[in-house]
Structures are given as C-alpha cells and as structure tokens.
Amino acid sequence: MSGTPDEPDFSGLEAGEAQQAVDIVQAVVAWYTEHITAERRAPLPDEDRIAQLTADRTAAYQDLTRLEDADSEEEGRLAALYAARLRQLEG
C-alpha cells in the first residue's frame, strides 16, 4: 500500500511492465542521491553513512542496467524488490 494517494504503488506490478520497473529503480536511486547530498551538506557529515548510501546507490544503478536485458520475470522481481525498498526507505 502506498503512503499517500499520489505515490505509485508497485506492489502489484506484473512481469513485463519494463517501464514501471525502471521507474521504481530510478526512484530508489533518486532517494539515495538526495540523502547522499544532504549528508554531505551536514555540518558534520557521517562518512560511513555516505559510503553506505553510495554503495547502495551503485547497486541500484547496476540493477537498472540489468533491466535493459532482463526478461519479464527478472523485471517483475526487481520491481517488487525496489518497491519494497522504496517503501522501507520512505517509511
């Protein structure tokens, strides 16, 4: 379930909906980018947190690249994985 009516809900994404899979992974990448930037701008940046966020963002980018050649099953798996991750990150 999404937190607000305007949030996309990818929990019921069906395999083969490649663009929705790409959109949700990009949303996670954007979340990481926003939080990396905020942490870097903090008066006392937490370098360990920046490193973890950066590693997580890199992994998301790699999955985004994998979507280019993914079959419908993999698209669905990644979409569900990243939909859950985005809900967790925003929760």
Image (tube, rainbow, N blue to C red):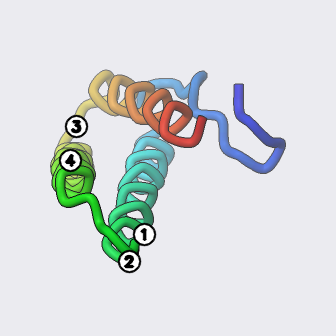
The secondary structure type at the circle numbered 2 is helix
Q: Quadrant of residue 35?
A: bottom left
Residue at the far right in the pictured view: 5
Provide residue 19's location: percent of width, then percent of height.
46, 50
Q: CA distance from mark 4 to mark 1?
A: 14 Å
Provide residue 87's location: percent of width, then percent of height.
55, 34
Residue labelled with disc 1: 38
Q: CA distance from mark 1 to mark 3?
A: 33 Å
In depth, the one of 62 and 31 nearer the eye is 31
Q: Earlier in the sequence, mark 2 or mark 4?
A: 2
In depth, the one of 85 and 22 nearer the eye is 85
Question: Do labels 4 and 3 touch, CB within 8 Å?
Answer: no
Any part of residue 13 in sight: yes
73 horizontally vs 59: left or right: right
The secondary structure type at the circle numbered 3 is loop
Q: CA distance from mark 2 to mark 4?
A: 16 Å
Residue labelled with disc 4: 52
**Label 3 neighbour load within 10 Å: few <14, some 14-19, many 20+:** some
81 horizontally vs 62: left or right: right
Q: Earlier in the sequence, mark 4 or mark 1?
A: 1
Residue labelled with disc 3: 70
Question: Do labels 1 and 2 touch, CB within 8 Å?
Answer: yes
For the residue marked with disc 4, what is the amino acid? Gln
75 horizontally vs 69: left or right: right
* Label 4 vs label 3, nearer the camera: 4
For the residue marked with disc 2, what is the amino acid? Arg
Q: Quadrant of residue 30?
A: bottom left
In depth, the one of 15 and 81 nearer the eye is 81
Residue labelled with disc 2: 41
Q: CA distance from mark 1 to mark 2?
A: 5 Å
